C-alpha cells in the first residue's frame, strides 16, 4: 500500500491508480516534487514485487475543451511518467507500455468538476506476463 494511490486486483492483473493532481504541477505536465516522491515509491514497489512483469502506464486526462486536448495532455503525462521511471529510477525501458486514453474511459460523471478531477488519473497496470 502506497499512500496517495489505490491498488486493486482484476484476476491476475494488479492496478495501481493515482490522481494526476498528486503527481503533476499545476501546468499538468511537469512532475512535482511531491509527485516524484510518489513515483519513486511506486517504482520501488514495482522493483520489489513486479521486477519481471510488463507494466502499462495508462494516462487519463480531462483538462481542456475537446477530446483532442484531453488526449494530448494524457499523452504528455504518460511520457513524463515513463521517462521518470526509466531515466530516474533506471527501470528497464522494455518493461513498460505507454498508453494515452485521454477522456475515452471515464469512471465518474464528467458533468461536474469533481467528476472530471476524479477521471484525471494514471494507472500502472501490472500484467501477469513477464517482459
Image (spheres, rainbow, N blue to C red):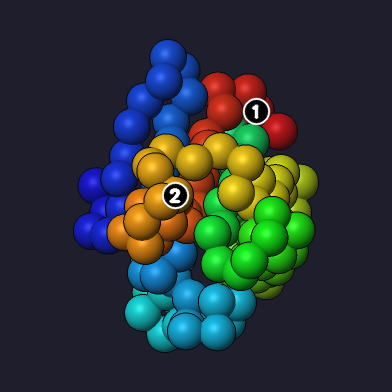
The image shows residue 35 at horizontal and vertical percentages of: 42, 74
Where disc 1 sits, the SS reads: strand
The image shows residue 27 at horizontal and vertical percentages of: 55, 84
The image shows residue 61 at horizontal and vertical percentages of: 56, 58
* Residue at (48, 24) in percent of width and height: 13
Q: Is residue 69 above or below residue 9?
A: below
> From mark 1 to mark 2, how far is it between C-alphas?
36 Å
Where disc 2 sits, the SS reads: loop
N-terminal of the pair, mark 1 or mark 2, is 2
* Residue at (41, 20) in percent of width and height: 10
* Residue at (60, 49) in percent of width and height: 103
**Residue that numbered label 1 is attached to:** 130
The front one of 104 and 24 is 104
Q: Is residue 119 above or below residue 107?
A: below
The image shows residue 97 at horizontal and vertical percentages of: 71, 44
Q: Residues within 10 Å of mark 2 (few under 14, many from 20)?
A: some
The front one of 74 and 47 is 74
Q: Residues within 10 Å of mark 1 (few under 14, many from 20)?
A: few
**Residue that numbered label 2 is attached to:** 110
* Residue at (69, 54) in percent of width and height: 67
Q: Residue 90, located in which quarter of the rendered image?
A: bottom right
Q: Is residue 40 visible?
A: no
Q: Nearer the viewer, mark 1 or mark 2?
A: 2
Amino acid at each position: 500500500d502506497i499512500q496517495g494511490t489505490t491498488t486493486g486486483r482484476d484476476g491476475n492483473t494488479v492496478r495501481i491508480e493515482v490522481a494526476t493532481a498528486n503527481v503533476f504541477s499545476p501546468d499538468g505536465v511537469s512532475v512535482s516534487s511531491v509527485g516524484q516522491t510518489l513515483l519513486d515509491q511506486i517504482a520501488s514497489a514495482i522493483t520489489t514485487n513486479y521486477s519481471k512483469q510488463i507494466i502499462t502506464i495508462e494516462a487519463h486526462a480531462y483538462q481542456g475543451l475537446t477530446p483532442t486536448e484531453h488526449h494530448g495532455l494524457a499523452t504528455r503525462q504518460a511520457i513524463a511518467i515513463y521517462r521518470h521511471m526509466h531515466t530516474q529510477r533506471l527501470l528497464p525501458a522494455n518493461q513498460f507500455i505507454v498508453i494515452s486514453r485521454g477522456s475515452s474511459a471515464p469512471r465518474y460523471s464528467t458533468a461536474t468538476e469533481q467528476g472530471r478531477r476524479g477521471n484525471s488519473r494514471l494507472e500502472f497496470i501490472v500484467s501477469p506476463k513477464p517482459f
